[in-house]
């Protein structure tokens, strides 16, 4: 509980509220008498992570929380112990420092940018009351309780309670782009009591009210509080608040009271960490690393035991091997174990993690640079907002899509309506022109309507139902009106509301302006002002909004509009036209139109007074205010009289049917989650090819296992568990709330263990986007909240097929090929040391080749395969969606592939070691010398290894560029250059204790039989790979192999001899080829055959493509 002393009384507030404050006329204004035992934040913000003293320790702490970095640090510590080290300590230190340093520099650059941004924001200026007058102050010096004055185009520095403004009724227009990305203006208003009494500077300085409000939280759509002033209690809600990050628009001056400051503000509370997402390959790679580490322990333990036995039998008894250390064989084995841990650590080199991050960064850049995903109309490119999920795009099994604004354009047009049982807006007759709005000087010239009968009835003023219909549309809304260049412009919270108010405007009922308590409209050239007694706003649970108005003649009427499911439950038994309106609603829904029902209710003064008292009590409730208000709303929103219904068209986006069809062919299951009614969603499903005529459509509980689509509503979501386990190609969930959308995604992830993608464009899709494995945001008409919460973003739904079928598939194939080959080449290299151990007394001995191998000799070719390789081009990837299936099934990288790479590495290491070993066993050079020293042996083995791994990656490369050729040849050239350098006399003179084998490389490689040994070894290692690839492509070809084969063919343009039926029409119904003929672009050599055979012409590639 909180306690506050206020004018001699003891006040108590429930612990769920953080702040109880009183203001007295002092130098700064508000004084906090009591609050929960938590420090009230100042207004300075700090988004940076480090300062000068904490950067190094904190950054290192964060980096060493990664298991890989900790593993390599442990190796470095082992290398610093002289008794067990087998490698110079700098061979691990240098790459580890490079990795840590690069990451630290990147973190430092990011943090410096945050420092600069924080400094710029904290030093912004605003006016604050100090010493009884407004004075300039920096944002960072603002405190809770200060009164702030803002002017037009100022940013709001903290979460403020709006007290007054220069606009009538203390209205204040704000832009919330930094909060939710929406650029349409919203209006806030001060309480009437503060508007009347707090306009002057002196009045503001003497203000001494007391507020109680909720704890600081991240809910941008809710605020609950009360203000006690002069013994009167007033409710505070979100409409009274100016949130930090908003920008004041169309308001010359306003005054606000700081409620939350700094990190307690809602925008800062929303700046928390996004849930960390990991790919399936990441998870699998972690398990494989654990497997490799277990293998490393087993191998090292076996070699250590071998060393102990060898020392007992041979090493300890050979005088020439005595090293002067009197150590037991078991102790030597213990030291050898740690030595082999160091030697064989290249099974999991540090370069693996660096290379993976480089590849992911490059793949993200390719998405950003893709001009085929650029939307020129809005100058919106595709954007990869994360670099860690690219390969997951190639494994999607379920797509969860919003409908409005995602599949459709979210550009609403008033098309049809039903009024008192009569339908208007039917399809236009031939040559029937649209309605001429010249009689209405305030009409929106872009508005088009085809039914002249409705316009005539409205203009005649004889049809009371039509008059009431459009009056309701002009009054029951939250639209704001403003004038730009003498043109009336509406700012609507949603496109639906904008379309309805615009329709009323063109039919002669023009919404002109609103204040906190009034709404002014022009009714057929007569201007009327209505007193707004209450506004019962829309939310996703209520699915309706109402307004209670007092007419100029004193009547009180409630207007309500909402979804038919909630309106019909609240209609009066005496309401007329229910059946005919329901028939019209079904017809509109079948035409994929969005519908709303309109109704009204006349209220007596006594009834309203009684309801108003209950409404006011609910407004000032501090506990569960929303539930209390809903109960009060239910009491007045009953016994309604139906007027009619509206039908708004929301057209499909370009390319949606084609995109869904291709994704379905890729065996991606598509679920549509929408708040629309069932019939509208179903018909949109047919329009966009999600539903087809050969599908059986089942509703809710009717679960069958065949080619089925399920249509379920929020009331039948209880059957979702059964549907999840049904192999259905698509599901449509209707009338679902944002929370239910996220729950559906969670259920599929939990029970199907599937990779999911959610795509949406509005704030109601954020939960769904964050819940899925990958979230895609569309920058549409509903702001940027979905984009800001997403992993990938673009402007049109049709770009999804390119994101998945091209970039996702390429990223998956590249990453899998990279990982398979990376593990292979390191197994092949590391296990050579294992075989050598049986011939050197199990002593862990290596040289600097272990460091250079992954750094210079083999890293670039495999890295470029991970960045650039593609089995087929983007055109074929889109043409054959079945190419996407291997990624969904995880066929290209799994434990089977891992063990294939392991055994392939074992085979190659055996060949690379034992063939040169046999060649060196009993041999003599042409010059009489015997190059049988182990350094010459090492030169031959290392040369064989470098040739093998670089030629092996060449065989695995599907897409060759100059860069790939340069990388392969350059890696081999770098190897020989460094090898001859480290065996040269010059470097021996500089570092004689390290480089002791002068001339070993040149001596070994001038022997022809050693070159023959290298060629023979390389040939034997590559021959099985070539044979297996040949068999796979000829006997067991994959879909990709067939597509590549088809792409390489050059079929003849025509095939003759068949018979086909031709249309009797002389001309095609589609566009002809006159432009091609006139420009000469289509001219071919004249065929030698007769013209009579042209009826049998058919294209060969199309048939082969269908077969594939």
Image (tube, rainbow, N blue to C red):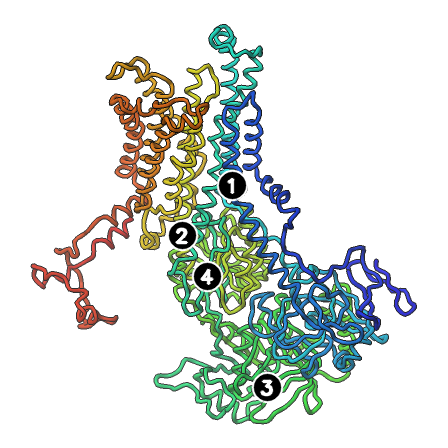
Whether residue 634 is visible to the viewer of this picture, yes or no, is no
Say few, some or many: other residues with alpha carbon within 10 Å of mark 4 (under 14 / 14 to 19 / 20 or more).
Answer: many
* Mark 4 or mark 2, earlier in chain: 4
Which label sits on residue 653? none
Say few, some or many: other residues with alpha carbon within 10 Å of mark 2 (under 14 / 14 to 19 / 20 or more).
Answer: many
Dot 1 corresponds to which residue? 99
Instruction: Give the image location of residue 147, x and y in percent.
Output: 75, 72
Q: CA distance from mark 3 to mark 1?
A: 63 Å
Q: CA distance from mark 3 to mark 2?
A: 50 Å
Instruction: Give the image location of residue 117, x and y in percent.
Output: 60, 60
| 779 sits to left or right of 959 | right
Q: CA distance from mark 2 to mark 1?
A: 28 Å
Q: Is label 2 in contact with label 1 (beta carbons under 8 Å)?
A: no
Dot 3 corresponds to which residue? 512
- SS at circle 1: helix
Of circles 3 and 4, the one toward us is 4
| 202 sits to left or right of 181 | right
| 302 sits to left or right of 891 | right
Instruction: Give the image location of residue 444, x and y in percent.
Output: 49, 84
Q: 2 or 332, which lies in front?
A: 332
Dot 2 corresponds to which residue? 807
Say few, some or many: other residues with alpha carbon within 10 Å of mark 1 (under 14 / 14 to 19 / 20 or more).
Answer: some
* Mark 2 or mark 1, earlier in chain: 1
- SS at circle 4: strand
Residue 418 vertical position relative to residue 968 in the rendered view, above or below? below
Q: Which residue is painted at 57% across and 31% down in the image?
A: 74
Which label sits on residue 794? 4
- Quadrant of the image occupied by residue 534: bottom right
- SS at circle 3: strand
Q: CA distance from mark 4 to mark 2?
A: 14 Å
């Amino acid at each position: 509980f909180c306690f506050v002393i206020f004018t001699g009384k003891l006040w108590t507030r429930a612990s769920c509220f953080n702040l109880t404050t009183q203001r007295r006329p002092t130098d700064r204004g508000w004084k906090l008498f009591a609050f929960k035992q938590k420090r009230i934040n100042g207004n300075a913000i700090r988004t940076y992570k480090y300062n000068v003293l904490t950067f190094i320790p904190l950054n290192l702490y964060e980096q060493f929380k990664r298991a890989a970095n900790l593993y390599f640090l442990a190796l470095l510590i082992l290398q610093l112990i002289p008794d067990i080290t087998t490698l110079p300590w700098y061979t691990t230190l240098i790459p580890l420092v490079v990795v840590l340093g690069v990451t630290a520099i990147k973190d430092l650059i990011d943090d410096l940018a945050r420092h600069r941004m924080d400094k710029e924001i904290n030093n912004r200026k605003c006016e604050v009351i100090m010493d009884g007058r407004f004075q300039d102050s920096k944002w960072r010096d603002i405190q809770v309780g200060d009164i702030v004055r803002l002017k037009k185009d100022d940013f709001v520095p903290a979460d403020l309670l709006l007290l007054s403004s220069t606009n009538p009724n203390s209205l204040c227009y704000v832009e919330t782009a930094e909060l939710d990305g929406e650029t349409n203006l919203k209006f806030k208003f001060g309480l009437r009591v503060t508007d009347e009494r707090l306009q002057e500077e002196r009045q503001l300085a003497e203000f001494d009210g007391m507020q109680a409000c909720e704890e600081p939280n991240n809910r941008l759509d809710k605020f609950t509080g009360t203000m006690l002033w002069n013994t009167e209690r007033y409710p505070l809600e979100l409409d009274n608040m100016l949130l930090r990050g908003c920008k004041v628009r169309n308001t010359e001056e306003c005054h606000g009271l700081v409620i939350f400051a700094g990190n307690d503000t809602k925008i800062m509370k929303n700046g928390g960490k996004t849930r960390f997402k990991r790919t399936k390959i990441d998870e699998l790679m972690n398990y494989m690393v654990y497997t490799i580490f277990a293998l490393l322990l087993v191998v090292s333990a076996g070699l250590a035991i071998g060393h102990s036995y060898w020392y007992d039998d041979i090493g300890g008894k050979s005088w020439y091997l005595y090293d002067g250390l009197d150590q037991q064989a078991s102790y030597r084995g213990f030291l050898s174990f740690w030595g082999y841990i160091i030697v064989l650590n290249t099974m999991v080199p540090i370069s693996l993690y660096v290379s993976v991050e480089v590849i992911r960064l490059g793949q993200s850049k390719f998405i950003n640079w893709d001009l085929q995903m650029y939307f020129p109309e809005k100058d919106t490119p595709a954007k990869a907002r994360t670099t860690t999920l690219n390969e997951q795009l190639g494994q999607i099994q379920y797509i969860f899509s919003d409908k409005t604004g995602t599949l459709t354009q979210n550009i609403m047009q008033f098309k049809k309506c039903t009024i008192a049982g009569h339908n208007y807006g039917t399809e236009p007759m031939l040559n029937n022109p649209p309605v001429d709005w010249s009689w209405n000087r305030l009409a929106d010239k872009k508005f088009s309507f085809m039914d002249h009968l409705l316009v005539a009835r409205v203009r005649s003023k004889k049809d009371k139902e039509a008059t009431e219909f459009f009056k309701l549309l002009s009054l029951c809304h939250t639209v704001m009106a403003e004038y730009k260049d003498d043109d009336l412009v509406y700012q609507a919270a949603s496109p639906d509301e904008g379309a309805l108010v615009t329709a009323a405007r063109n039919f002669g009922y023009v919404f002109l302006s609103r204040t906190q308590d009034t709404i002014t409209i022009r009714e057929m050239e007569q201007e009327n002002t209505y007193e707004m007694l209450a506004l019962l706003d829309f939310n996703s649970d209520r699915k309706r909004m109402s307004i209670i108005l007092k007419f100029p003649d004193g009547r009180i009427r409630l207007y309500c509009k909402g979804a038919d499911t909630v309106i019909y439950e609240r209609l009066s038994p005496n309401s007329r036209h229910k059946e005919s309106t329901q028939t019209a609603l079904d017809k509109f829904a079948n035409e994929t139109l969005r519908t709303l029902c309109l109704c009204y209710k006349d209220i007596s003064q006594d009834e309203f007074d009684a309801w108003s008292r209950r409404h006011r009590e609910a407004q000032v409730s501090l506990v569960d205010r929303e539930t209390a208000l809903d109960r009060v709303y239910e009491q007045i929103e009953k016994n309604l009289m139906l007027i009619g219904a509206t039908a708004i068209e929301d057209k499909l986006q370009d390319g949606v049917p084609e995109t869904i069809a291709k994704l379905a062919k890729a065996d991606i299951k598509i679920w549509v989650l929408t708040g629309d009614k069932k019939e509208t969603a179903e018909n949109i499903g047919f329009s966009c090819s999600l539903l087809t005529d050969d599908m059986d459509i089942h509703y809710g509980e009717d679960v069958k296992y065949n080619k089925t689509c399920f249509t379920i509503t929020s009331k039948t979501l209880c059957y979702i568990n059964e549907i999840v386990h049904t192999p259905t190609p698509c599901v449509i969930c209707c009338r679902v709330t944002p929370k239910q959308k996220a729950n559906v995604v969670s259920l599929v992830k939990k029970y199907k263990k599937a990779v999911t993608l959610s795509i949406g464009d509005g704030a109601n899709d954020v939960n769904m986007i964050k819940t899925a494995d990958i979230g895609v945001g569309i920058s549409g008409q509903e702001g940027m909240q979905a984009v800001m919460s997403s992993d990938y973003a673009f402007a049109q739904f049709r770009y999804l097929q390119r994101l998945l079928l091209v970039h996702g598939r390429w990223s998956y194939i590249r990453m899998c090929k990279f990982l398979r080959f990376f593990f292979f080449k390191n197994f092949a290299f590391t296990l050579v040391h294992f075989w050598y151990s049986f011939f050197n007394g199990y002593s862990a001995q290596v040289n600097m080749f272990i460091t250079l191998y992954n750094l210079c000799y083999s890293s670039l070719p495999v890295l470029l395969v991970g960045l650039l390789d593609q089995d087929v081009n983007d055109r074929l990837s889109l043409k054959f969606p079945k190419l996407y299936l291997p990624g969904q099934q995880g066929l290209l990288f799994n434990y089977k592939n891992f063990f294939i790479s392991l055994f392939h590495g074992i085979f190659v290491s055996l060949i690379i070691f034992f063939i040169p070993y046999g060649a060196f066993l009993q041999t003599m050079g042409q010059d009489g010398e015997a190059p049988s020293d182990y350094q010459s042996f090492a030169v031959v083995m290392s040369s064989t290894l470098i040739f093998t791994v670089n030629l092996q990656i060449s065989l695995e490369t599907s897409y060759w560029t100059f860069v790939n050729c340069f990388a392969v040849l350059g890696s081999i050239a770098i190897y020989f250059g460094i090898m001859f350098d480290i065996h040269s006399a010059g470097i021996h003179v500089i570092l004689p204790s390290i480089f002791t084998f002068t001339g070993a490389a040149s001596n070994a490689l001038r022997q022809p039989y050693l070159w023959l040994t290298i060629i023979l070894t390389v040939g034997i290692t590559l021959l099985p790979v070539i044979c297996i690839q040949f068999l796979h492509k000829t006997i067991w070809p994959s879909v990709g192999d067939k597509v590549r084969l088809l792409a390489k063919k050059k079929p003849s343009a025509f095939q003759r001899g068949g018979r086909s039926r031709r249309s009797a029409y002389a001309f095609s119904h589609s566009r002809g080829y006159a432009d091609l003929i006139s420009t000469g672009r289509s001219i071919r050599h004249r065929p030698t055959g007769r013209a009579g055979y042209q009826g049998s012409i058919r294209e060969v590639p199309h048939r082969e493509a269908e077969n594939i």
